[in-house]
Image: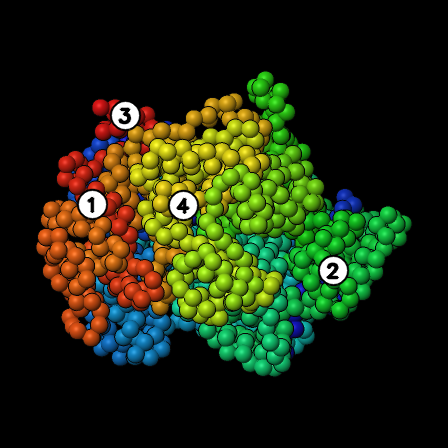
Amino acid sequence: MLVNSAGSALFPPALLMLDDGVCFEGQAVGACTETTGEAVFTTGMCGYQETLTDPSYYGQIVVFTAAHIGNYGATPKDDEAPAPQRQKFGAAGAVFHDLFTLAEHAPFPHWRAGNSLNAELAKAGITGICNIDTRALTLHLRTHGSRNGIISALDLDRASLLRRARALPSMAGLDLAQKVSCRQMYAFEPKAGDTLPGGAKKPGQKIFNVAVLDYGAKRSIMLHLLRHNLQPTVWPAETPAEDILATRPNGVMLTNGPGDPAPCAYAIAATRKLLGKLPLFGICLGHQLLGLAAGGKTTKLHFGHHGMNHPVKDLDSGRVLITSQNHGFCVDPDTLPPNARATHWNLNDNTLEGLALTDAPAFSVQFHPEAAPGTWDAYGLFGKFRQLIEDF
Amino acid sequence: MPKRSDIKKVMVLGSGPIVIGQAAEFDYSGTQGCKALKEEGCRVILLNSNPATVMTDIAFSDRTYIEPMNKFVAAEIIMKERPDAVLPTLGGQTALNLLMELHKMGILEEYNVKIIGARPESIELAENRQKFHDAMLDIGLDLPKSCLATSVAEAVHLAGTLNFPVIIRPSYTLGGTGGGISYNIEEFQENARRGIDASPIGQILLEESVLGWKEIELEVMRDCADNAIVICGIENLDPMGVHTGDSITVAPIQTLADAEYQALRQDSLAVVRAVGVDTGGCNIQFALDPKSGRRVVIEMNPRVSRSSALASKATGFPIARVAAKLALGYTLDELKNDITGTSACFEPTLDYCVVKVPRFNFEKFSGAQPLLGLQMHSVGETMALGGNFREALQKALRGLETGIAGLEEKTQKSAVPVLAVSPASRLAELKQLLHYPGPERVLQLYEALKLGLTPEEAHGITGIDPWFLLQIQSVITSEKELAEDFTPEIRKALDQPEEDKPLRAGMSGTAARLRHFKAQGFSDARIAGIVSGDGGAEIKEAHIRRLRETLDVHPVFRTVDTCAGEFAARTPYFYSTYDGVAPDALHTEHTAQTGRIGQSREATDKKLPRKVVILGGGPNRIGQGLEFDYCCVQACFALSELGIKTIMINSNPETVSTDYDTADTLYFEPVTCEDVLAVCRAEQPDGVIVQFGGQTPLNIAEELEKAGVPILGTKPAHIALAEDREEFGCLVKKLGIPQPASGMAGDEEAACRIARTIGYPVMVRPSFVLGGRSMRIIHCEQELRSWVGGRESGLCLDSSSPILVDKFLEEAVEIDVDAVVDRENLTIAAIMEHIEQAGIHSGDSGCSIPTHTLSRDILATIREYTHKLGLGLCTIGLLNVQMAIAQGKVYVIEANPRASRTVPFVSKATGRNVAGLAAKVMAGFSLPEIDFTAEPALRYHALKEAVIPFDRFPGAEIALGPEMRSTGEVMGIDRSFGLAFLKSQAGAGMPIPYRGNVILTVTDQDKEPLVPLAGRLSALGFTLYATPGTKAVLDSQGINSNLVVKIGPQRPHLLDFMRNGQASMIVNTVSGAASAHDAMRIRAEALSRRITLLTTLSAVRAAVEGLESRQSASRLVAPLQDYYAGIAEGTRPC
């Protein structure tokens, strides 16, 4: 028997309190306890499974602007957190407008789903809040910037919540990469049922080894590498460059990850040492680390870019890519040294979206070419990385 | 890439008359396109035969040709205007087909006219099913298994390779004309034959059935630098098997995971690139197997489409405007998104839910089965935006104006009481009904779920995705809560005296709960109905409204900003929702603004309204279409000119009025009292205009006035007076104007008595219907008795719904007059003479300006009566009067102090913007002040002809009558009446042939008058064929004709003659029931074989005059601008 409860009766009341005192009333979903983090909004209309499991959202409460979330249930096949990760969900919490839920144990009516998103969140211990005016919240975050907040179904005292929200540390200056990175080096293996993005591997192609520096890597990055016959070996974030070089990989992937790149001094140092020695490809946080390693600076964006519809101009081809994005910091193009060249620009706010070094085989993009969720417009960059390796 | 420098003059092809499958959306896209081209400094040359469009207003093009949309006319225009380029992608299939013909003629090459928007090869590839199929396989995409056939025999042979059901799609047809699903070989043969006939190249595609799969459409734009973006994904609630135009559709896509959606996106971009749509918009349709995830391409349109209009309105992204600019050579990243100021090269994202519901008119075509399939049947649509799907769906349903206030049992609203049946048997019946998708499927589904059908069962029967079913289920759950749990609370709240503030103050819980139910989409009327269901005192919509006001439960208004709030937006496009707590700041700012008074001293002195709401017409339907939208749009423009802030409320996504830059502010809302009052509450306008949007706003005018909304122009009471037969009768009598004799009957005997007194033939109709529904002309008592007793009258005879019996004036000429009245003065805009005789609904009848057979005296009488009526009805604004002239006497049939269907035609014919002038009058100007004091005198002729969708309703009776059934119109304009008539016929797709065989078969009274016309036809070179009676009269007057046998046992008879392709034109007039049966068969045959059929002698006369003029002078192809300036060749004073 399917039972829908888009009404409110089934869930306990909860509050979302932001550190500026703005408070929203709703109902708790998932674990129905309490969570804290930086509230950021994402404008993607689907792909909530990928989003919530993306380690880059570590420490953040994701606000979905889409009216309906959970429509096709939980699709664990789309999980982005690699298996040895300590937790399944990257995000600290979630805010929904209208979350599609079912009575307990009801079979989920979608051919790919096994469970409802609500049940999955509960299982993983993630607390969310639903029936929130997410547009009002989004407009507030857009105007006043991303900010810390608490979702609680345990403590409904507003004064206490506000006090605790104010006490939360700011994202800026926080090194979160090491918190989500793997503890030990491992060779990445696909799960049963994984499909390689963009088609099958080219048969007979030479296999190269790629060292993946895991700052919060998404699984799809690894799947993309595999698809190009680049065998990923995943390393903890704090691995020194010497250890990597000692294994003589053919290339290095600097992955995405949460938080501020600036405090990751170990990663910047390692990147600097690897520059010129091996072909390097950075994504998102990896891009920021490459920018910092090259001598540039990063700044925090007002409310960041989170979504799947951000237009990016590729200066080399002149083409516009519709990209998937998820970042709160960016590389300041004015601080780049002469040997770093801007390759991609964001058409919305003219921020830097990609760079390449002129004197080393290294390039990076701020957006997510692996998508998941998002368009496949930038899949080609993994082929470009392989080419760089082949040409090295 | 910068704009191309080689394109300065662009010819835009419109879409011609409104037909099912090609409607007002192309006026919207064409208007946007023309505006964009002019903005870029291009000279625009427009060809469109449809005068009811906004785009054919001379403001939108430099040279406006309202001429038949055929290759000869287009070629003449090209030779005359020498455009640099032709843009065919904004005018639907008609424009693409015309372009292909021009391309094949070689004229484009000869005159060096570039094709922009789409290349002929791409059009060919997208439209030719086999080529498209091969191209898709080439790029590795999957399609349903299929094969092509050009004969029934071949089709039957090939059908053996596919499993039933098999789908048939004819090549190159509009909106799926001639397509169908066959479940057995018998049906298959029938459908194959129809499909081959419908295809202009006699080709059909047989296809593996993907019935029950998910149906998804993506709207894609691409530029010449190969940037491609998806503007919107649309999911059909009704799975494959129901034409997408007839499906309830939802945006954004709700039930696909990212991996599935992105795969479709990637496929759609691959399709666009493979087909080679270089610049502009197109849409691609996919089917997705919900069990396996297998996805197949169904089709693509290499042009802007109905879905593009929907996608534009749903997202705020102006597809047609951008398409026009891309055609000029811009790239997407060079264009700005006007709403956010960011790049136009992005994909809109929505934070609300959009639902479109189609509107049907099956009841207009008696005999046609109300079943939905591959061929489109809907005549209009309404769209709603809401904070969630449930709210949007219920808003859309009440916006449909079919008498429902949201999801509810249709039977509750039926005029005829339904016999009580047990829930179990009703459920069994509903289950049966749900197997065959019909126009009310969603309501049946709702009712069945309420009666206990499980969502799983419902999914099994309908294939509708469980998510949608569970959303409907959730509405039902809420309804139960409302009925059982919340009703006592509401009643208690209603019982509180309103002034008892302290008690009210303690009701924040009630307010919150009420808001929760409102957020599920329940209208006040629906809540009132549910609360009343407890058997207590009846609660009315107004009670719930008052309760909301006291509890301060109001909707918030949200901006359609393309970006889900990510960027600051500047757009005047809003929708309401209860599913939110805070209004958008932009809306709050916006409502604070008022008009810019003081542009002129005169305007300041007049104390013009500062802010005016214009109510649109809601979904299009037969009898209320594009014409009314035209009027609303003109009113916006005219008021803006005066510095008045205009606010549009409408729910029709196909229209220009719902373009976000037509009015100063757009509210995309159902045109119901509740929704309009909510906007008025937020905006506090100085006036509301109700007389431009057709019946829809008029229906709520009195209620709005009662709620304190100031109505501009003619007062609702006077509009109502004109509709009330008794009161109107009194007024007419007082004014000394003759009316045909009439009476009102409560039963069959009374009806017969009245008919005997006033004399047959009589026109009868039930009193509760509008728009000529169920009207009938009756010739004898027997016929009258069978009509009263029969089911087609829709009568349930009792004194509460009497029958109106009117004397039917035989052989009468019908007249339409449109005028503008300022309370004291009246100026006639045009007097129109119908081509068909009285008795045919004025909307279905052709008519001409100026009149062509009326004497000076008659015209003087018409003018006199019009003046009297206009002032007698206290009109301020537009007035339409219908009159009939019989035996030299003028009778008034009806008068309506509001916009009529003919206003756009009159405006195009005369060059005076009648609706705009009327709007200014309503704002407070007098006719002399706006310089409209003289009836325009034309030195040319303009004819309107109606287009009727009989071909969409096989089995329906094909005859014109008092019930309107046309969907669209065309105009023919020329120096002579005859030539204008020929053009109007050519424009309507029934060109008058100029050689060949003519069959003459007319009634006795028409035989003598036919003689001279037959002689002239013969002189024109036609070979005459006549049925025995007609032939005898012709023989006696010495006119040669051949005999053709009447329909009967003797073969070959008239129908055989037609079927053998021997007739090029048929003249067939009918009177009485006797010849009607044969006439129907002749009409059906003529229609399906596209043989020109003339059913009145006045039409024959017009055709003969036209053909004769054609011999002496060539047809004139000239733009409206030249006609208006008096410089069109031949219109110069001699």
Type of amino acid under label 2: Ile
Q: Could you say whether the residue bearing mark 4 is in a helix, strand or loop?
A: strand
Q: Earlier in the sequence, mark 2 or mark 1?
A: 2
Please tell me which of labels 1 and 4 falls first in the chain. 4
At label 4, the amino acid type is: Ala
Disc 2: host chain: B
Q: Amino acid at mark 3?
A: Ile
- CA gap between label 3 and label 4 equals 34 Å
Q: In terms of depth relative to the viewer, which is nearer, A24 or A6?
A: A6
Which residue is label 3 attached to? B1127
- Of circles 1 and 4, the one toward us is 4
Q: Nearer the viewer, mark 2 or mark 1?
A: 1
Subunit ID for the residue under disc 1: B
Q: Which residue is mark 4?
A: B884
The residue pinned by badge 1 equals B1104
Distance, label 2 to label 3, CA atoms, is: 64 Å
Q: Same chain for marks 2 and 1?
A: yes
Foreground label between 3 and 4 = 4
Q: Which mark is residue B623?
A: none
Identified at 55% across, 28% down, the residue is B824
Which SS class for mark 3?
loop
Label 3 with label 4: CB-CB less than 8 Å: no
Q: Are marks 2 and 4 in contact (CB under 8 Å)?
A: no
Instruction: Give residue B539's mark.
Output: 2
Type of amino acid under label 1: Val
Q: Who is closer to the viewer here, B452 or A230?
A: B452
Mark 3 vs mark 1: give the one in front: 1
Same chain shared by disc 3 and disc 4: yes
**Chain for numbered disc 3:** B
The mark nearer the N terminus, 2 or 3, is: 2
